[in-house]
Every structure is written in C-alpha cells, then in structure tokens.
Amino acid sequence: MTGAVMDTDGIQTGSFIFCTSYIVDSADSQERYRKWLAYYDEMKPRFGAARIFLIDDGSALKNIPGALSVVDADQRLPARLPDGPVMFRFDQHYGRKSISVYPGWWRSFSFAARIAARYGYRKAIHCESDAYVISERMMNFMAGLDDGWTTFWCQRWGFPETALQVIAGPQLSTLEAFHDLGEDFWFTDLGNAGFAEHILPFTQVIKNFVGDRYGECMEDYPDDVDFVCQAVPSMQFQNRGRRVVKTAD
C-alpha cells in the first residue's frame, strides 16, 4: 500500500496516521503536538500514509496550533476534508477518571474507524503523541501491512505496546465496534483487566523490533532502536537521522 488515491467521488482511500490528543495551555503540551505533527507530516510517505490526523478530547480552541484544520467530531463528518493536517475535535472533554478509566482515549481512539469508513481508508496507523517510529525497517514494515490488527511489544512492562498499532482491512470494523459501545463501555471501571493492552483484539504482537517506554526512566533514548514511547521533551527525533537496525534473530 503506497498511500492515498482518489476514487470517482473524490474520496481518499489508503491509509492515515493518527494520534489522540488533549492540548492544554502550557508550552510543553503545545510543543508536544507541534513536534509530533512536524515529524509525522514529514515521515508519512515512508509509512505509505496520505494524511495525518489528531482526534481530540475537547481541547480549548485557543490551545490548538494554527497549522491544524478543525473538524467537529460531534456532527456528521463533511464529504471532503481540508488539505493538510486535520483535528477531529469533540466538544466535551471526557479525560481520564482514574488509572483504569479513560473514556477520552477510548472515544478518540475508536473514532479512527469512523473516519476510515467515512473517507474510504483501508488502514489506520496509530502513533500516540509521545510515540516515535524512527527506523526505516519498522516504517517499511508498517507500510507493508494491509490486513489484521498489529501492535508491538513493551519490554519494560511485558505487554503489547498500544501506543503503536496498525489496524487494517476488516479489523477497522472491529475497531468501530468499540466506538459503538459508547459511554457505557468507555466509563466502566474494569480494573487492570480493562486496560486497552488486555482488551484490544490484536491479531499479531510483533516482538522483533527494538524499543520501549524510554521516557519513563531516561532523558534520551539509546542508539540503534526502532521506536521510542513515552518520549519526553528533551528527546529529539527530527534531526537525528533515520536509523538502520539489524533484524533480530
């Protein structure tokens, strides 16, 4: 899959990269999303992606970067999207109620399936706003996926890394089912068993890429890794070059 094409009705098909978002009135928060936008807007062709989107949990309009076009996610989505990066914004902020109750994330994350259905996309590439894919081999791998629900591995905690996922083909309908469940599901506290890492129906968890949630314990990330999660402001990605990492045996 090599990105989007246009069908006879002018609707884009192909794939997109997205993150969930909530931008507050602080320099760190706004810089976090500017950094993500700049990086993935440059790198999206390497993922075979046509567009990058933010799906937002009710950020105040004054906090949203001017480079983004804003679409009301509470209304019927328009037939055509503006050019460039787009934010799909819900008006009401759901947020996170506890460590195991995070309705804002569930609503935004699962809404990606509604976007795919509306605009004819066949693949959604989820890269959270503090998650960076930095090796060519991992970008190429993600670009080549055209079916299934794929995630990677968090070595630090020993579970699937939900900050990076590829949902393609019929699995987009599976993702949409989580949106259809609505508030009764999003606000339910299932304890540790309710974590997305344990609920999402991955069809494959790939463990041969090198990466972790380095930002939880480091100010920078090691050389020769494929991805970085929980990135902190001191970590730089734009100008550190693309790594070439040997495939694990």
Image: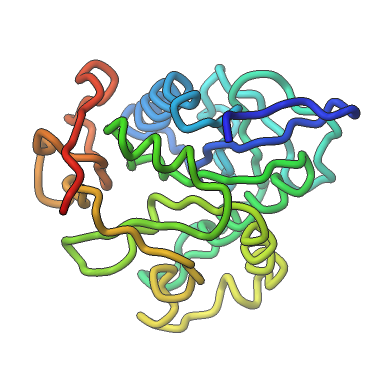
Q: Nearer the viewer, residue 174 or 7?
A: 7
Image position of 221 (left or right of 23) = left
Q: Residue at x 76, y 49 (%)?
A: 117
Q: Residue at x 41, y 73 (%)?
A: 195
Task: Point out the image quarter for the N terminus.
Answer: top right
Q: Nearer the viewer, residue 58 or 138?
A: 138
* Residue 221 x/y as whole percent: 13, 38
* Residue 53 x/y as whole percent: 58, 35
Image position of 104 (left or right of 99) = right
| In the depicted structure, whether residue 94 falls above or below residue 16 | below
* Residue 225 x/y as whole percent: 17, 39
Residue lying farthest to the front in this orientation: 249
Task: Point out the image quarter for the C terminus.
Answer: bottom left
Image position of 90 (left or right of 141) = right
Q: Residue at x 25, y 24 (%)?
A: 242
Q: Nearer the viewer, residue 156 or 232?
A: 156
